[in-house]
Amino acid sequence: MKKIFLLYLILPSIVIAQNFEFQESIGKFNKASSFYITANGLIYISDIGTDEVYLLDTLGNQLKTCGGYGWDDNSFDQPVDVFADPLSIYVADKNNHAIKRFDKNLNYLSKLHKRDSDLSEERFGYPLSCATSNQGDLYLIDSENKRTMKFDIFGNYKINFGGFDAGIYQLSNPLQLAISAKNNIFIIDGQDVIIFDDFGNGINKISLDKNLKSIRILFDQLVICTSEEIYNTYLKSTEMKLNKINLEDFILNKPIVSAILLNKKLYVLTQNEILVFNFAS
C-alpha cells in the first residue's frame, strides 16, 4: 500500500485542484519561520526576526510571547521550527544547538542539547526541525551532519538515519520533517520528500521537481509547500492523490513559509502574517 501511495504522489496526471477562498489575515510578525496549530485552536509561531515564539488563538489574539535573543533557557538564537503535541511545545533553537520544550502556555520546561556530548553518535548541531511521534519519541534534523536523529521521551539517544550510509535515502539538504500517525517520518530534502519508518529504514522518495520549503501533517492531512504553491493529500484516503491547492483569485504577494489544513480551513504562513482560507470546493 505504501508503494501505491508513493506512485500516486509522483504521477502529475492525477494531481487535482482544491479551491479555497480568502477569509482574513491574522497576526503580525517580523520574519516568521514556522508555525503549528493544536486541535483546540492554539497557534504557535516562531519568528527568526525577533528570536521569539508567539502564541495566538484562531481569532488572531496574541496570548503570550516568549524568547528574545540570547543563550539562556528562555531565549533563542534563530528559532527556525516549532512543533506542538498535546502536552508540550518544541522549538528548534538553531544557533544554540538545542531543542527547547515548553508547556502550552510557553513556560520553559527543559531542553535537549548534545553538541558537547562525549558520545559522537548523539551529538547534533544547528537543528532545523523537530517533531514528536505518538509514542513520545523526539525526532530532529541535525543539519551539521545532514541526518535525522531520534531520542526517547527522556532525552536518551536512540538512532540516527539518513546519513552517508543510507544509500539512495541519504539526505543532502534536509530542511523540515513531519511524522504521520503511523510514525513514518517525512523529510523535505531539496526537491524531494524522503520517507523513513520509525526504525530509520528508508521507505521511498517522492520527487516533485520543485524546491520545497515546508511539510506539515495534522490529523493525517499532509501539506507540502514551495514558496509559491501548496499541495496536500489525506494519508488515510483509499485514493491518496496529491492535490494542488487553488487560492481562487487571491494574489500572494509574499512567499509562502508554511501551511496547515485544519477543520476545512487552510492557514498559510508568510513572514509577516497568517492568511486564513475557507474550503470552497
Image: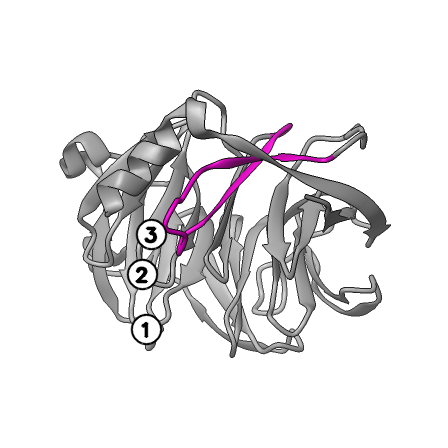
Give the crowd class for mark 2: few <14, some 14-19, many >=20 residues within 10 Å: some
Q: What residue is pinned by disc 1?
A: 135
Q: What residue is pinned by disc 2?
A: 183
Residue lying furthest top: 209
Q: Relative to 12, is 89 on the left or the right?
A: right
Residue type indicated by callout 2: Asn
Residue type indicated by callout 1: Gln
Q: Vertically, is 258 above or below 83?
A: above
Labels 2 and 3 touching (C-beta < 8 A): yes
Residue 238 within the magenta-colored segment of the rendering: yes
Magenta stretch? 227-247
Task: Indicate the quadrant where residue 139 lies.
Answer: bottom left
Q: Earlier in the sequence, mark 1 or mark 3?
A: 1
Task: Indicate the quadrant where residue 208 lies.
Answer: top left
**Residue 193: image x %, image y %?**
37, 36
CA gap between label 1 and label 3 equals 13 Å
Q: Which of marks 1 and 2 is nearer the N terminus?
A: 1
Task: Name the residue located 77 percent from the left edge and 30 percent from the top edge.
Answer: 252
Task: Name the residue located 62 percent from the left edge and 69 percent from the top edge.
Answer: 74
CA gap between label 1 and label 2 equals 8 Å
Give the crowd class for mark 3: few <14, some 14-19, many >=20 residues within 10 Å: many
Labels 1 and 3 touching (C-beta < 8 A): no
Residue type indicated by callout 3: Ile
Residue in front for this viewpoint, 97 or 87: 87
Residue in front for this viewpoint, 55 or 196: 196
Q: Relative to 85, is 256 on the left or the right?
A: right
Residue 38 within the magenta-colored segment of the rendering: no
Asked if residue 270 can be seen in this view, the reply is no
Residue in front for this viewpoint, 76 or 182: 182
Q: Which mark is residue 185?
A: 3
**Residue 38: image x %, image y %?**
60, 68
Query: SS for tag 3?
Result: strand
